[in-house]
Amino acid sequence: MYLTINGNRIEVTLAKNSSVDALVEILKKGDVTYTANDYGGFEKVGSLGHTLPTNNSQITTQAGDVILYSGNQIVLFYGSNSWSYTRLGRINGYSVSELKALLGAGKGAVQVTISLE
């Protein structure tokens, strides 16, 4: 799966669960674009526009984690938090400072496009 943020296309290594399977089925029909906003000083979060099944467990996130929250919110972490989440995947190959710059941490909304190709 890929995320495109401010013209930057990044690869996400997907988790293996029914939430990811449902997201892939949605993405087979076309890309999904949503607006992500800063929350808590450690994440960008926005509504997927679809509800996915959840596979929640207590997780301590790290920068680069792609998480499903409440079944319909996609969270991109540039910091850490502990909560009951569903892991969707992981952005690899970026330092914390690079992720913060990519996501525009603390600088307001960004458009995120999720795609399979």
Image (cartoon, rainbow, N blue to C red):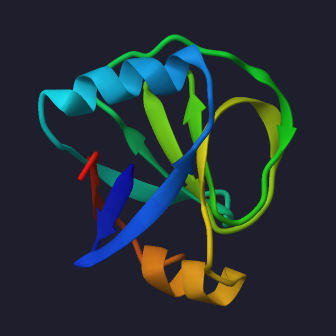
Residue at point 33% right, 34% down? Answer: 48
- In the image, farthest residue toward the left: 30
Residue at point 52% right, 20% down? Answer: 19
Report whether 53 appears left or right of 112.
Answer: right
Residue at point 58% right, 87% down? Answer: 98
Task: List x then y, in percent, for residue 104.
Answer: 45, 79
Task: List x then y, in percent, for residue 93.
Answer: 62, 78
Quarter where residue 26 is shown: top left
Total labels drawn: 0
- In the image, farthest residue toward the top: 53
Q: Is 44 located above or below residue 6 in the figure? A: above
Task: List x then y, in percent, for residue 59.
Answer: 84, 37
Report whether 83 appears left or right of 116.
Answer: right
Quarter where residue 63 is shown: bottom right
Report whether 16 appears left or right of 83.
Answer: left
23 or 96: nearer the eye?
Answer: 23
Residue at point 29% right, 65% down? Answer: 4
